[in-house]
Image (tube, rainbow, N blue to C red):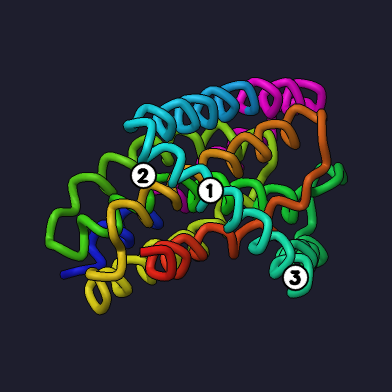
């Protein structure tokens, strides 16, 4: 089944998120905030590692990828701002949050958990390359990713609650869509496009980490279109 990897990844995130939400009930809000900051540091490390990997290619290829990444980031942010993707995602989270009743009466962070976890699990080179590999019948990459995502979801849910579980659906749509896209139009996903998507993804992960640490309040969801523009940009420049 071509979507096996995406399905396993999504299910693991949902189950781990549920477990983390259960453990969250006994964790004070102050401790949950510290856990969130700790995860933010880990996410920062992931983003830095991805950014470093993006610049380890040859000088000519690296310059080409940098130009594509900057262009796609600028245009993608404009598109995202016009579509107000971040607002729509937060409204969905708030819609769910309005129907969540915390037994202890404390505030719920469903919206924040949904947006943060969705961006964290969906953005990055691993999701892209894993989906492409799944299109060829190799699901090991996404299954390995599901283990890492599961651990992250468990920890993240102890800080942000049930919203992390909702990210499983978004993850299934994202990775499943990439897998089907690779099956249908694999020829358009050139190595340059894949590397550019990974570079943009690393930059977005850095934005997520800065938000989690409270340093910035970037509307990262509005940058999502930048992840897909490298496919068109590489075709144009090629």
Residue on which disc 1 sits: 67
SS type, badge 2: helix
> Would you identify the image quadrant in which residue 216 lies?
top right
Question: How many residues crowd mark 1 within 10 Å: few (<14), some (14–19), many (20+)?
Answer: few
* Residue at (55, 44) in percent of width and height: 120
Q: Nearer the viewer, residue 83 or 152?
A: 83
Secondary structure mostly taken by the magenta-highlighted segment of the chain = helix
Q: Position of residue 69 (x, y in %)?
A: 53, 49
- The image position of residue 16, as x and y in percent, is 46, 43
Q: Quadrant of the C terminus?
A: bottom left
The residue lying toward the viewer, choosing from 58 and 189, is 58
Is 3 situated left or right of 194 in this image? left
For disc 3, the marked residue is: 88
Q: Which residue is mark 2?
A: 126
- Looking at the image, the residue that sits furthest to the left is 137
* Quadrant, the N terminus: bottom left
Report how far apart the C-alphas of labels 3 and 1 lie in the structure.
30 Å
13 magenta-colored: yes
Q: Nearer the viewer, residue 24 or 159?
A: 159
Q: Which residues are magenta?
A: 11-39
């Amino acid at each position: 089944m071509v979507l096996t990897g995406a399905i396993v990844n999504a299910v693991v995130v949902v189950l781990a998120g549920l477990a983390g939400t259960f453990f969250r009930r006994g964790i004070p809000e102050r401790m949950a905030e510290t856990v969130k900051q700790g995860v933010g540091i880990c996410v920062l490390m992931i983003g830095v590692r991805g950014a470093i990997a993006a610049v380890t290619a040859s000088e000519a290829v690296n310059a080409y990828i940098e130009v594509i990444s900057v262009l796609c980031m600028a245009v993608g942010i404009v598109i995202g701002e016009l579509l107000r993707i971040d607002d729509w995602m937060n409204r969905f989270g708030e819609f769910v949050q309005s129907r969540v009743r915390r037994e202890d009466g404390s505030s719920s962070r469903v919206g924040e958990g949904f947006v943060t976890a969705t961006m964290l699990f969906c953005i990055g080179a691993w999701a892209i390359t894993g989906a492409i590999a799944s299109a060829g019948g190799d699901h090991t990459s996404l299954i390995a990713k599901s283990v890492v995502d599961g651990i992250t979801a468990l920890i993240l849910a102890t800080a942000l609650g049930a919203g992390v579980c909702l990210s499983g659906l978004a993850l299934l749509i994202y990775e499943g869509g990439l897998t089907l896209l690779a099956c249908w139009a694999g020829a358009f996903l050139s190595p340059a496009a894949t590397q550019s998507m990974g570079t943009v993804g690393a930059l977005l992960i850095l934005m997520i980490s800065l938000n989690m640490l409270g340093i910035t309040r970037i509307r990262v969801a509005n940058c999502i279109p930048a992840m897909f523009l490298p496919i068109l940009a590489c075709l144009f420049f090629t």
